[in-house]
Image (tube, helix red, strand yellow):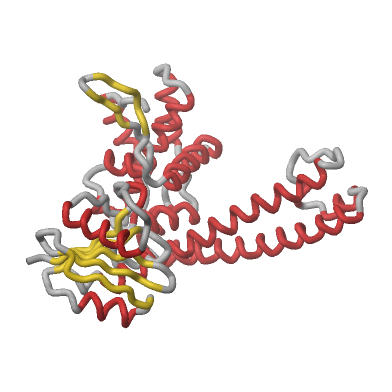
Amino acid sequence: MKSYIGLDGHSTSCTFAVLDSEGREIASQRVTTSETGIVQFVRGVKRPRAIAFEESHMSRWLYGLLWEEVDELVVCHARFLSARSGAKTDVSDARHLAQQLRGGFLTPVFHEESPFFELRSLTSGYQNVIQEIVRTKNRYKALFRSEGHPTQGTTIYTDEKRMDALQRKTDRFVARGLWDQLKMLGQQKAHYRKEFEKNVKEIAEVKALASIPGISAVRANGIASIVCSPKRFANKHKFWSYCMLVKHDQQSDGRSYGKISVHARSDLKQVFLGAAESVLLKGTSPSLKGYYEDQRSRGIEHRRAKFNLARKIAAVSLAIMRTKEPYRETVERRSDSKERARGLKSF
């Protein structure tokens, strides 16, 4: 008889609820959040056993801790976890997870023991730095705008003497602090970029991705850290959906209610749209830019043509992660001719 374990994890404590195959609760316990306490409880549950917990800041650690201790492990997305009635408690949350696991109603989030998961901390830290730079720049610029000073262009962030134009002493004091913050954040950004460049030299998949026009070292690291295993995508269409680069019909009773994007990796969507923009601006790939121009010549408007180019780059990225072979322009040209022959459905 299989046991189903629901785990409600927090930074200081973890609560378990265990159901049998008939849905009867056979155990529940709260333990301190530690490797010893968690593993000891799970090992005390009779095999075969399955466990489920929500995606969170702890899920990667819990996955590495428990994936060899159970026969089935599901990390689920809280967004797709069905609502339940009654007051919220840790025990009831754990019990609900166990019930949903037993019924097969959980939507799993991809996890595996992969070296690419190490890149996730790096890319996440880099994104935090970038976001903080944007916020600090906005606060710095607001000081000048509050006194009616022009803020067009980027010289406001490079010319330190611009602060002297601020009339109020307190504004100059605050501006100096923000200037120092920007300088420190810029140094952190440079350190992250060095790590990304290092990975391009040392990791075959990242090196191959960085060879694609429009895919910088930063973008290559980001793609590898999120995709991890390209084998989990049956084809490029599944990957496009994961990247939010396609929309799906909403239908009921034979009637269409419009199209929507599934909730997935919006960060990958931005990566590939940014890569498409880079190809168009820099013209580094004649075949990819020609792919865009061919669509425009057939009457497809700019936004759709750029979106299709982003999907093209996404498909190439998935193939390159599988083969670990660098991008070759001649191969892309052959692919272009095939797609022109059979036509491409616009986004």
Q: In which quarter of the image is residue 3?
A: bottom left
Rendered-image quadrant of the C terminus: top left
Place of residue 61 in the rendered image (x, y in percent of width and height, measured from the top left): 36, 70
Place of residue 43 in the rendered image (x, y in percent of width and height, measured from the top left): 20, 78
Q: In this view, does 181 lie above or below 339?
A: below
Q: In this view, does 171 lie above or below 119?
A: above
Please give the name of the residue rendered at 16% of the width and 52% of the height, measured from the top-left corner: 103
Please give the name of the residue rendered at 21% of the width and 46% of the height, measured from the top-left corner: 234
Give the residue furthest to the left: 1
Please indicate whether residue 160 sits to the left or right of residue 139 in the image: right
* The one of 292 and 177 positioned closer to us in this rendering: 177
Please indicate whether residue 9 sits to the left or right of residue 195 in the image: left
Place of residue 159 in the rendered image (x, y in percent of width and height, measured from the top left): 81, 52
Place of residue 338 in the rendered image (x, y in percent of width and height, measured from the top left): 27, 30
Rendered-image quadrant of the N terminus: bottom left
Please give the name of the residue rendered at 25% of the width and 48% of the height, measured from the top-left corner: 233
Give the residue furthest to the top: 299
Q: How many marks?
A: 0
* The one of 145 and 23 positioned closer to us in this rendering: 23
Give the residue furthest to the front: 86
* The one of 109 and 43 positioned closer to us in this rendering: 43
